[in-house]
Image (cartoon, grey):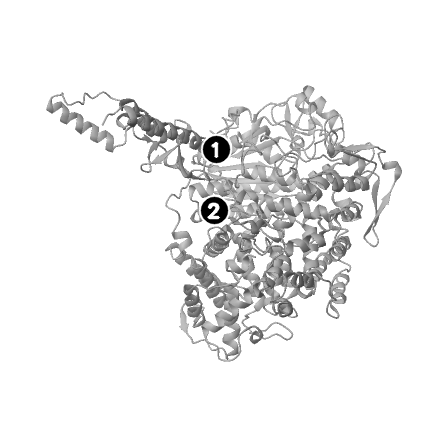
Amino acid sequence: MRFKGLVLGFNSYAPSGRRALSLLLLSILYLSNLPLARAVDWVPVDPSSVYTVSDPNFGTITCATVKNKRVSGRAVSDTRFLPLSVSVNKLQKKARKAYGKKARSLKKKASNLKKRMKAENIVCEQGPPVFTPTPTPPPSSDAVSLEKLDRAVEAEDVRYLHEKAGFGYSAREQWLASTAVGGTIDTLVDTYMSTRSEDSGLMEKVNDMVDGSIGEDDSHTQYGQRQALFELWTHTNNPYAERLALFLLGVWTVSGEAVDDGVFRKMFWDYYQRLRNYSYLDTNLTELGVEITRDPFMLVYLNNELNIKGAPNENYARELMELFTLGTEDLDGNPNYTETKPDGSGDIAVAARMLTGWWVQRDWWDLLLETRYSAARHADGPHIMFAGTPYQFTGENDEDLVRGIFANHPQVKNYYAKELLQEYLTPNPPRELIESFGRTIAENNYKLRPAMNVLLKSKAFYHPFYKDTLPKNSIEFAVESVKVLGLENAYNVESTDWHLLYMAMQVNDSPSVFWFSPNAWTSAALALERANFVTNLIRDTDAQQLPEPDWLPQQILPAGEANTRQVIEHIAAALGIDSVPEPVFQALEAYMNRERQWNGSFINQNYNNTNAILQRRKGLGVYSILMTSPSYQLK
Amino acid sequence: MRNVSLARRKFLRHAAACSCGALAMGAIPGLANRPAHAATGNGTKLLLINMAGGWDGLQICQPSSGALYTTFAGMRPTLKTDPAQLLDINGAFGFHPSLSAFKSLLDEGKLVSVLNVGYLNMSRSHKDAEVAFARGILDRESVQASGMISRMGEVNGWSSLQALSLNGIDPAFEGASYRGIQVYGISNFRYGYDYTQNYAETLDRVATARQVSDLWQIDPAKPKQAEVVSSVNVAVDSSELLYQARENTTFPTAYPNTQLGRSLRDADILFSNSSLGTEVAYIKRGGFDTHSEQTDSFDRLLPEFNAALTTFISNMKAKNIWSNLIILVISEFGRTNQENDSQGTDHGGALPIFVLGGPVNGFGNSGLIGAMTTTDLTDDGWLPMKINMVDIYRQVFARMGYNPDAAFEPAAGSEVSLLFS
């Protein structure tokens, strides 16, 4: 073995005493990891600079920072690293010493290894494994196919459809299973999407909850609106349309509290009704865009009321493209529009000019907003949008702008396809699916109902690849939990609203000009708040007060003398948990057969499914525990 | 619902103390079993304050003299502050009159303003810009990265309490395997805080949920499953510790009852309780997306910020934490150089970042790093990026005792080498 660094005169011809001394010194230096005595095979490295990267071509690559450069190689120990370049050098050296066929073979090996080293070094140079891994590619063509599902509908499909495209699945929705299971996907989805009348008195109650909250202290209005919507979501017979309205709010976001500091917050209700109306119709996005652009609430929220000829305010112009129609970049990362330039050109500036003319009349007595138009405030055209691109168009005003964007810009369809797939299917939809669904949306002239009908019937939608990939947002979680527990008529309206605040989803008070991404719904704080919400829902109070007025735990537990395992199986089925691992069964059974005391000790008690107190405490407890499972938190 | 008898409170404190003892003994696996490569810094703590919405750095740190001021004043006829009212930095720039806390720190040599900070291919979209700053990458278009806190946590094997977001969900905490806690105020981060419920039973349910959490079969191809499990584990493992910390913390100076006051109070709690091991606290204050009536917004927001920050600094000094505390005040972008006709400003480009704290080398660089020219104001609608945010992040984490190479791209070479002493 040769060592670089100190010349120690270690060779076979040296006197034996000197050889022994050299060996001793080398051993000490080697063991103490001093660089002077390190072998050429490895280099000392900072342990924190060593990392691995998963690469689609080379599998796992180990990288380390050597001489301020990230290189590929192998970690010999925590502090020692063998760069691939050393192996390449060795092979090259061997090849030089060899002859004939062996030399050619070694040369080829060295050349291949060098190529690989270069490629791996490039991967290493890109940095440590902290970047988002490439999403797993879809396993089959069915996973990206919008072709109609060609098998008979199964019970699981009915649940899955409600989970992904509604507000969860509970006893309220089971009627559809009895109608659709064994039939075609057409029957299931067409029935699901069809508009049915709401139960008697629901809409009156909803409207009363809004109207009744408007009193002398108008801040109550925000509570009333949220409580009314929660009541609607827990009782609706039209989960498709109501869920779509919530999706549309996630795109065309407004905040009741941000409009004139909340003074006109009651106008949020009118705004949301517009989204609901479109969700029940064919949901033509172009028409919705034109209407919302002139909605007084939006005009105030994004400042377009202040956008005047010669005195532009670009806020709405920007968000119209960034958040409502295009996104900042296309699927290849190219910008979808241009920024304002000092000379007043650029798509945002042009759009802002087209959007001028509108202002808002404030009725301070009744706290109402009304849209007004003034020709004097409008910047006359013609205006050229997306100048110099294949999708350039000319228009005069806001309506021309919105219609022009939908009609001409090639990215609108992909933007909506991606937004819908992220909301309804999976956080990272495959590009192929985005593009094919985008085409479907455009072919349907931006009418979402027929486009969603295609998606909800597709092979892709029901592919197992997407099951349990999308976290339920907090409203979906809360509404489904109320329904699964059978508490639609007995949940605490006020505390539910309070919990939704801490679950980060007060529907009329968005966190920003956009809502959270699907990736946000798996935080520790949400896990805790969701557990607290369920605790509050089932109300195992000291006073043993049951939710009012007419709810008993027996309604959601198996009847009679079911044993612990049967109870757990019953609850898992109600929550849509496909399989409960045996260790989970055992842990839950142990929980059911004990009672925790105030001092932290436990006493044994045998669960008895005919004992009302144990049903309430332990039966419902199993519900609350299983609601923390990945199967229930994801859809 | 929140009324509770004194005796019950007393009992709960005892119960919580027992739980805490169990935690200390490693009875809760999530804390006891930290990754083998877990790393802690050198004791330096970081408070990130994000003035969300894109705050107008030009009005926070305003040109105050010479050609730069003349140009600026021409572009900001209604929004400019009279130089006589500004709190002078170096004769060329001054702080907004509301920011006396900044001025005091500047005079102590404990504040540096870094001008024209951003990243390559800056975005003027709230969504993209917020994510870009949260990721801490040199070039927004070059790489898909996880949030920088999440990344630091992953590569250093941080515990879930080593970094917390105190104002909820934030992209800085997303993407990598690390699960820093993102909470809406730590006072709410407790199981069973609804005292009308059966607390003993609630605790048993929580403990059982924690027990079964690790028993679910996870499909490696579905990363959200593991995230759900992890989030439950982190929540259970951390909530009582935070509750105890909250109960045990006192404040030499009371915090104002404002959003920022409450957030900084929470940060105080985290940093005051060394047993938590918190090294990074992240808070966010929205409202800076000032497309109209910017002066009104600033008159409301900046005094709130100043009062809360003054109290926080005072308490940190009183608790001897200040000398090892770095505060970074950021936003997602600056605003347009030219005011609009609604007495506001629109989305802009680069912005000043403020680095405060005991380790800051303010005197070493006159309290100001970077240079702004009149052409910066006139060439484009917004300030150009001259100093990459990554260079600041790298320096901050290096000062905290971490190897920045492990989580950040190599430095862009900006002249920010004198941030810390």
Residue at disc 2, secondary structure: loop
Res. B86 image quadrant = top right
Res. A586 image quadrant = bottom left
The residue at 11%/21% (across/down) is A15
**Residue farthest front in this picture:** A101
Residue B275 has which mark?
Answer: none
The residue at 74%/58% (across/down) is A280
Q: Position of residue B356 (x, y in %)?
A: 54, 34
Q: Which quarter of the rendering shows the N terminus of chain B?
A: bottom right
Protein chain holding label 2: B
**Residue farthest left in this picture:** A16
- Residue A127, compared with residue A264, is above or below; it is above
Does residue B167 appear left or right of residue A312 in this picture?
left
Amino acid found under the numbered disc labelled 1:
Gln
- Residue B69, compared with residue A236, is above or below; it is above
In this view, the residue in front, B391 or A129, is: A129
Q: Which residue is mark 2?
A: B177
Q: Which residue is mark 1?
A: A126
Q: Position of residue A634 (x, y in %)?
A: 55, 56
What is the distance, in whole Å, between disc 2 and disc 1 at their CAs?
19 Å
Protein chain holding label 1: A
**Label tally:** 2
* Disc 1 crowd, CA 10 A, few/some/many (<14, 14-19, 20+): some
